[in-house]
Image: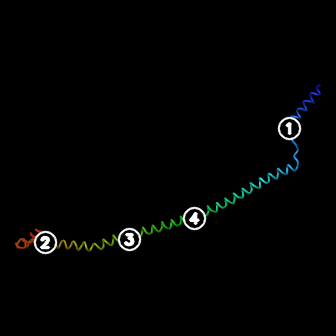
Amino acid sequence: MMKTLMWGLLFILFLGCPVYAADTTEQRLSRIELRLEKMDKIEAIVNENRERLIKLEEGQKAINQRMDDMGKRIDDVRDLIYVVLAGMFALVGFVIWDRRTALAPAIRKNKELEEREERLERVIKEFAEKEPRLLEALRHAGFV
């Protein structure tokens, strides 16, 4: 009885163990083919993404070149603005200098004429003190 019990236990143990069926060559080949197809699809996707990335990099290089060109243009315009501003300041300085030099003789002449006018006015007033008709004319004109 012991022997049967042992054989029975061994039989149950072997039945309870999973049994793996041996793969046939065709099944292995079909799985390998499926994996190869998947790898080919993945490779195609990677190549497609690589091409897109290359195009994007080329586009980025073109954009960077355009931005560099634009920066150079802005620098050129900035330099031109500085030149124009310097010219304007020089012109304003010249106008101020020219005005002072042009007005200096006129101011001098004006002072001379004012001094002469004051002297003539004094002479006329002194003479008007002796001549009543002249004094009356000066009062009528508002000088006295």
The x, y position of residue 66, in whole percent, is 57, 65
Q: Earlier in the sequence, mark 3 or mark 2?
A: 3
Q: What secondary structure is marked by label 3?
A: helix
SS type, badge 4: helix
Q: Residues within 10 Å of mark 1 (few under 14, many from 20)?
A: few
Which residue matches tag 1?
18
**Label for residue 121?**
2
Q: Disc 1 residue type?
A: Pro
Disc sitting over residue 66 in the figure: 4
Find the distance from the CA under tag 3 to the CA under tag 2. Answer: 44 Å
CB contact under 8 Å: marks 2 and 4 = no
Amino acid on which disc 4 is placed: Arg
Disc on the earlier residue, 2 or 4: 4
Which three-letter amino acid code belongs to the residue tagged 3?
Leu
Q: Where, quadrant-wise, is the N terminus in this rendering?
A: top right
Residue 40: give x, y in percent of width and height.
77, 55
Disc 2 + disc 1, Cβ < 8 Å: no
The secondary element bearing badge 2 is classed as helix
